[in-house]
Image (cartoon, helix red, strand yellow):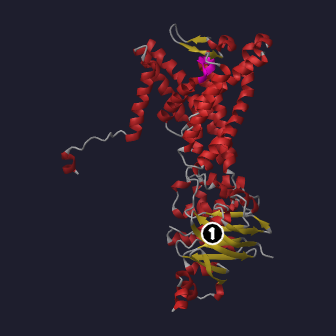
Amino acid sequence: MTFFSVNGLECRHGLLAAVRGVSLAMNEGEILALVGANGAGKTTLMRGIAGAHKPHAGNIVFDGKDVTGLPAHKRVALGIALVPEGRRLFTGMTVEENLRVAGAHGRKGKWNLEAVLEAFPQLKPKLKAKAGDLSGGQQQATAIGRALMTNPRLLLLDEVSLGLSPLAVDQVYESLHGLMSGGTTIILVEQDLSRALAVAHRIACMLEGAIVLEGAAASLSRDAITDAYFGLHRAGAKA
Amino acid sequence: MNFLNQVLQGAMLGGFYALVACGLSFLFGVMRIINLAHGSLAILGAFLLLGMLNATNWPNTMGDYGYLAPFVCLAIVLPVMAAIGWALQFLVLDRSLRAGPLIPVLSTFGVAVILDNGMFETYGANSNSLGPFIGDLSFGSWNLTDTIYIGQLDALIFGTAVVVLGGLQLMLTYTKLGRTIRATADAPDVVGLIGVNQKLVFSAAAAIAVMLTGLAGVFDGMRTSFAPYDGGTLLIFAFETVVIGGIGSLWGTLVGGVVLGVAQNIGAEINPAGFQIAGHLTFLVILIFRTFGFKIPLPRLPFRKAAA
């Protein structure tokens, strides 16, 4: 049975339709990588799924329940968590407080402060540091940890490698590895195609608010994805 | 000696100002709302308490303990004020916040006008005081020396201010509600993503702020007289306290109140009419320093450029 699906979702910023009729379906434990150029609508789609952006049309079904009308905090209670683009930590609070405040309001489950610190050992010495004073990689780890503290069943990772050094990106993905093999359903937005192909079961490529290519990671060639990314398949069709 | 006494009395007055300001400061810190109805809400708190004293007749029926009646009533008025804060958030602040940061200034000004005139309609223009209800407490004092004394009510108010500010600080640091409030103040658009109902947090913050405002109003009514249109004066003192002490800092609020109170009393010592002007001047000077730093921009002298 489908664990999570998006059906004909449309999200707008004023008059601009950023997401135009996107449909997706995922099974539990699946990892989907969302790729696409800047402005393709990836972040808006993620925010729409998390409940941070009110959809204009379409619906979102999570574990058999229509969550389209639910505000973000109620979706968290059901098990949908977003690691937002740009991390958006509570910068004036310590790392520990950032994690605890999320743990206090999310679902109960196996993720707690100890489990998060085990997954992200780089945070251990920084627990009492203000989140705003951390390095980019540590901030990203805190942001992911904060989302995990709510014990999500569907984790949305929006550009976790944005603005990080290659070394920090490696570290973050290393920590995510356990999570990804642990059966959590994940949608991640990733600009690095090799990385997306390496970690995801399935790839969906967005262009101008719509999914133009979707398939199992193993079945898609880099060229096919690149063509879809830049919209070259359409140019090719015209020629 | 007289001068020292003025400083001491000013510091005690500062405790009162800190109490008046902390609701305003707290609401601004959490919701980024400038609540222009702040002073009027304080006066409303005093009127509610006065109305309750008159309605229950407890000051007379409680016999020897009649002077405690205002404090018993306070235990009922504070939750009522909290409920008013909750309602204010749901009916006014939440709606106006959606329209941008300036609309709450207008809407709370409207609330102030409604409250002021509503109280005028209900209670009339007469000055009232809660002083007569608290017995010896309103004038009792401890003599430190022959010329220096500390008023018991002043000490009670100062102590309450310290307890309230310290309690707020502890609540914000160590409780779940406190951490949630700080997270919401930090990033109101993000807390939903960790399962926090932002509107509920704002409502709790407004309830706490208005409750504290009511407490300040009641103390205002005990130490002096109050009338329906007195909210504006309290609002100005609250503003000056917050600006002097630094926005968003709870202990800064106490410092701000003390600085304002001391300045006013020293002004009054220099000239009997100097009370208000000394306070306002101190506020202005600190505001200018805060805006420009200690380097007030002066026209650059030509040799500076050569030196650089």
Q: Residue furthest top?
A: B146
Q: Is residue B221 magenta?
A: yes
Rendered-image quadrant of the N terminus of chain A = bottom right
Choose top left, top right, bottom left or bottom right for residue B218: top right
Choose top left, top right, bottom left or bottom right for residue B74: top right
Q: Left or right: where does residue A153 sit relative to residue A188?
A: right
| Residue B163 seen anywhere in this rendered image of the structure | no
Q: Identify residue type, mark 1.
A: Leu
**Where residue B76 sits: x, y (%)?**
75, 27
Q: Does residue B250 lie above or below A78 as drawn?
A: above
Q: Which residues are magenta?
A: B220-228
Residue shown at 68% from the left, 67% from the top: A57
* Crowd rating for badge 1 (residues with CA inside 10 Å; few <14, some 14–19, many 20+): many
Which of these two is toward me, B8 or A205?
A: A205
Which of these two is toward me, B81 or B37?
A: B37
**Where residue B275 sits: x, y (%)?**
45, 19
**Where residue A97 sits: x, y (%)?**
63, 51
Q: How many marks?
A: 1
Q: Chain of mark 1?
A: A
Q: Does residue B93 lie above or below A136 as drawn?
A: above
**Where residue A104 sits: x, y (%)?**
71, 52
Q: Residue furthest bottom?
A: A239
**What residue sits right under mark 1 in the picture?**
A45
Q: Does residue A145 lie above or below B172 as drawn?
A: below
Q: Does residue B179 lie above or below A178 as drawn?
A: above
| Residue B198 seen anywhere in this rendered image of the structure | yes
Q: Is residue B92 magenta?
A: no
Which of these two is toward me, B24 or B109?
A: B109
Q: Secondary structure at mark 1?
A: helix
